[in-house]
Amino acid sequence: MTMKPKLSSEDLNPIATRAITEVLAVQLKRVAEPVTPGDERLKKATGHHLHATVTLTGERIIGAVLFQVPVEFATKVAEQLLGSDAETDDSKDVTGELGNMISGLVKGELSSAGYHGTLGTPTVTLGSRITLHAPADSELCTTEWSCEGHLLSLQIQLSHPHLAA
Amino acid sequence: MIPKILTVDDSKTIRMILARLFRPFACELHEAGNGEEALAVAGREKPSLIILDYNMPVMDGVTMLRLLREDEDLKKTPVIMLTADSSTQIISIVARLGVRDYITKPFNEDQLLAKASRLIILERRQEGET
């Protein structure tokens, strides 16, 4: 990617795609299929979800990466990774760590494109499925995925403080 | 004497993955959730290898590494960084602090095992020579 004055959601989409597919493939040995925004399954995606949010702060970008998964998926993955029964805290920790790995890859790609930043530590919350909304001066990229029947979501929201002045 | 491996990560998930990975081998595992805890465990156990995260609360991996290198008893301990942060700035700092390998997350478990085994064997040889 060449250095542009501003990143658009179209620039962020392939970054998000590479990050989530690599983490699922390398760490979990799982494949995720993209889900289109109009897919009926998204309307039926209810139940409790775990959300891992990681902030990204730099001179040219400020934003956040949000990775969310159904609790059932997080529990299944936690049991696979830990090799034992998982409790709620284990599922939260696994979701946070996956969010951390995904954010690390996103940060690496943004950095290669000239947008350097520092990652925060993941914050994990439990709740219903959420969708970020971008303020007028920021970019939002939302990607939806299906993995073994579970709907996962990765959203990247970025603004460009150097352009706001 | 069996080798001691100290894993340092604020994520229980990573510590558990590493424990599962090394459990079948003849080694003693210790863990810590941040750099401060890790220095205390390292001082007590004198590990043969430390697998260290960068971004942690209380004390990060680079600060821990600096303090480790200032400690006469621990300064030669081999360290592998295992972190989601692939920034060239961090890589160059930890390289100057004598880190033997830098592995980014997500990571290939076999590759980590191979690198850890190689470092422990090398460490044993060096100990034998001195």
Image (cartoon, rainbow, N blue to C red):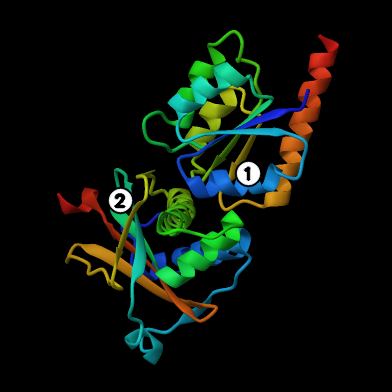
- Kindly state the secondary structure of the residue where label 2 is placed: loop
The type of residue carrying mark 1 is Ala
Mark 2 is surrounded, within 10 Å at the Cα level, by few (under 14), some (14 to 19) or many (20 or more) other residues, namely many
* Chain letter for mark 1: B
**Residue under the point 63% across and 19% down:** B46
**Residue under the point 63% across and 44% down:** B19
In the figure, residue A136 lies in which quadrant? bottom left
Q: Which residue is mark 1?
A: B19
Q: Which residue is mark 2?
A: A61
Answer yes or no: are tags 1 and 2 on the same subunit: no
Q: How many marks?
A: 2
Q: Is residue B129 visible?
A: yes
Residue A26 placed where, x, y %?
A: 62, 60
**Residue under the point 48% across and 43% down:** B85
The type of residue carrying mark 2 is Ile
**Residue under the point 32% across and 87% down:** A43
Residue B122 placed where, x, y %?
A: 79, 26
